[in-house]
Image (cartoon, helix red, strand yellow):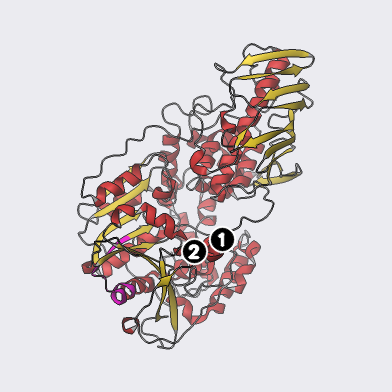
Amino acid sequence: MHKPAIALILTVALTAFGGASAQALTFSPCARDAAITCTTLTVPLQRGGPATNTVSLDIERQQAGSTPTHDAVLALAGGPGQAATPLAGFIAKAIAPALTTRDLIVFDQRGTGRSAPLRCKALQESSSLESSDQRVVAKLVERCARELGPGRAAFTSSETVEDIEAIRRVLGYEKLVLYGTSYGTKVAELYAQTYPQNVQALVLDSVVLPEGPEVFALSTLRAITPAMTELCSRNACRGITSSPVSDIAQLAAQLRHRRLRGSVYDGSGKRHTVSIAEPDLLRILLAGDLNPALRALLPAAVRSALRHDPDPLLRLSALARGLIPNLPTPPRVPGPEAHAAEESDALFLATSCEELTFPWQLASPPQARQSEALAALRLLHTSALYPFDANTAWQDSLIPLCLGWPNTTAAPKPQNTLPDVPTLILSGAQDLRTPTANARALAQLIPDAQVEVVPYTGHSVLGSDFGGCASEAVQAFFAGLAIQPCETTNNVFDPTPVTPSKLNFIKPLPGLQGKTGRTVSAILDTMVDLSRQVIGATLQLEQELPSGSSFGGLHGGYARITSTALRLSHFSFVEGVQVTGTFTLRTGEIQPATVQISGSAAAHGTVRLGSSKSVSGILDGHRFHVSLATVKLAQRMPRDWPTDPLRSRLAGLARIH
């Protein structure tokens, strides 16, 4: 479960309603894939409300093979607020072992995608929602609630549960296998509690408990220590830090008193003065749930900041926020899936603020709510918030958003039991949003539930597990076999070394001496760092970078990537060392090229790069040729980060050693 960026607009479409059970649905081929069929189902806006107020649910179906049963797999997306139908292709692959005899049903939950998407004009003021002035935020959200009107109470998990039951009945399925991810697991659990007789099995990926997340995210804060400990296990952080969590705590303490300020260069090489505060550090950590490259870059970036070199962490913050790279045009999403990138923030607010349990009286005005919530926060021991503090826990919570929400009903009281049905629970050991503690707590409520914890993996396990353990668990589960512990022993995204802040801190390349040796090492480190930024940005964008994407150097200049070339202009990773030149690209691999080396600290001249076997050139008048077979660079990764699954440009760039 996560907070989307608040930036969408909202209205509810109402249509005539004749009763879900009375409707005869007609499926027709979907525009994006004729193998999948589409239909809509009209359901009441609110059960027990006026019959004329309705919602049309967008439904997609993939039918089973030649031996279908009367059961189906029904998939539930995250959020709240994420549309599910754009994910149908991924879902079909992820849950394929269950589909040999079952149909797959994917639908946009009410208020998302094409199912009466909630939009609120007040949320166009996205910059105000990022404001630290909580009174401004509370007023803006209250405006959104008033704009939505009383119908906002209809966009809750319990209404979605009734939508699922309406879909099951009208399509004639006897039982459902519920497959949920993140917030979708909560909806699946609530359906199983409400209609246990209709549930055949549960597959729950990245568990949100039935009662929803804690408002102060204490389980998230508790999960930081084991996640970072695992990241640095097997001496992975040797030479970086002996205690990544202590480093985070130390930096967080400094940020409480003074923002970290420094420079970030954009894709045209322009310098920007930026800063971050303590809550931003937590947000970088949380971004690593969905992007393992960000998590791998963090220990060294924090260490650099503690050494008074802020720029690596500030650049990482910009990467986590999607500000890196500069894109030539917004990424194109194909027509029928244009709403794939949309997450209804209005629905997120309506569901979260309406049904979560907050530490205040529902009838209290915003100012009184704030006082009651602050009183509850003060009761928490500082150890419960480590490595952050109460202010950060407050700012990252839903409390500032929901202070001004005028609730229409009390939050539902969750039940304490779930049906005894076959259940597979998947959890990423690196997941901070929905920690493994949630998975284990839920397993206590389901007799014989099987839990698979996947090491070095974050949120949405089936979508982020590079090792295949989660897919193997799904295969075994639907084959009726016991789930075996994940045998993953290595992290495919190893933590990266601390960035050298000066050329004099770099060891000369073996076989070379002095400034020349250090300059060559810095050049090779520069190329590997660019590769990491490309991989991290590709993961963040969740698709191949468009031609023309450009990256600023850590200390100036830029690199621009097209479908045929990589151009570097005074691109600088180590201060005072600049690389200028153009590499030809063939199938994502850079071809050998000669580049110009300049900068105040560097040995000047030319260097030929592009082969993983050697590097040669002339620097400060000295000719050299060095084999790289046994070279260990300051910035070289112990193992190459995976590139093929990412479809990133410059797939071979990380292999320039």
Element under disc 1: loop
Q: Nearer the viewer, residue 625 or 465?
A: 625
Residue 340: % across, % down: 52, 61
Q: Residue at x 76, y 20 (%)?
A: 603
The answer to which image quadrant residue 598 occupies is top right
Q: Quadrant of the N terminus?
A: bottom left
Q: Secondary structure at mark 2?
A: loop
Residue 14 against residue 135 in the figure, above or below: below
Which one is nearer the viewer's eye here, 221 or 379? 221
Q: Are marks 1 and 2 in contact (CB under 8 Å)?
A: yes
Based on the displayed image, in which of its 4 quarters is residue 51 positioned? bottom left
Magenta residue check for 95: no
> 498 left or right of 373?
right
As for residue 173 lying within the magenta part, the answer is yes
Q: Amino acid under label 2?
A: Arg
Residue kind at label 1, given as amino acid type: Pro
Kindly tell me whether residue 417 is visible in this rendering: no
Please tell me the numbered disc located at residue 307. Answer: none
Looking at the image, residue 605 sits to the left or right of residue 387; the answer is right
Query: In this figure, what is the number of numbered marks?
Result: 2
In the rendered image, which residue does mark 2 sit on? 32
Nearest the viewer among 290 and 48 is 290
C-alpha gap between disc 1 and disc 2: 9 Å
Position in image of residue 377 (x %, y %): 47, 56
Region of the chain picked out in magenta, as a range: 167-178
